[in-house]
Amino acid sequence: MAIHQKEHQDNETRFERGLRALGEIDGHGGQQVVDSLADIAPDFSRYLIEFPFGDIYSRPGLDLRSREIATIAALTALGNARPQLKVHVQAGLNVGLSRDEIVETIMQMAVYAGFPAALNGLFAAKEVFDVAEPS
């Protein structure tokens, strides 16, 4: 009952809640990912909006800064998700993470995912920082 309480409280659908969260977190970059799926897998773009953003990111247990730290760490550790990592480095900046916090998060992954994963993550972050607004 408590799981669905928030959804029923505000009458916002998973999709609507997901779109709102996507815009707040990823801004234009997230919408570009969704749009790029339109001609190949439109259903997948809907799943992407509803589940990660409508269900998970919208939960009350963590703030968006904490969620982005966890996401940046996970994508860095995966080591094979550079485009998604770049989107979430930008998302981290969007939700108030500093460049130093992002760099420290990625560096921490050297302990758990190895130096190659952390190094690749740092280079991905550098690419985002090079085109982002100065902080």
Image: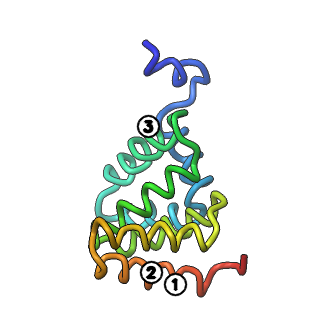
Question: Considering only order in the chain, which callout, 2 or 3, is on the residue closer to the N terminus?
Answer: 3
Q: Could you say whether the residue bearing mark 3 is in a helix, strand or loop? A: helix
- Which of the 4 image quadrants contains residue 120? bottom left
Question: Considering only order in the chain, which callout, 3 or 1, is on the residue closer to the N terminus?
Answer: 3
Left or right: 128 with respect to 50?
right
- Which residue is labeled 3 in the image? 55
Q: Are marks 1 and 2 in contact (CB under 8 Å)?
A: yes
Q: Which three-letter amino acid code belongs to the residue tagged 2?
A: Leu
**Is the residue 80 above or below the residue 37 in the image?**
below
At x 72%, y 76%, the residue is 135
- Which residue is labeled 1 in the image? 126
**Is the residue 99 above or below the residue 22 in the image?**
below
Q: Which three-letter amino acid code belongs to the residue tagged 3?
A: Asp
For the residues marked 1 and 2, what is the alpha-carbon distance in whole angstroms? 6 Å
Q: Nearer the viewer, residue 9 or 31?
A: 9
Left or right: 107 with respect to 92?
left
Q: Could you say whether the residue bearing mark 2 is in a helix, strand or loop? A: helix
- Which residue is labeled 2 in the image? 122
Q: Nearer the viewer, residue 112 or 10?
A: 112
Q: Position of residue 85 (x, y in %)?
A: 42, 69
At x 50%, y 35%, the residue is 59
Q: Position of residue 21 (x, y in %)?
A: 56, 47
Q: Which three-letter amino acid code belongs to the residue tagged 1?
A: Lys
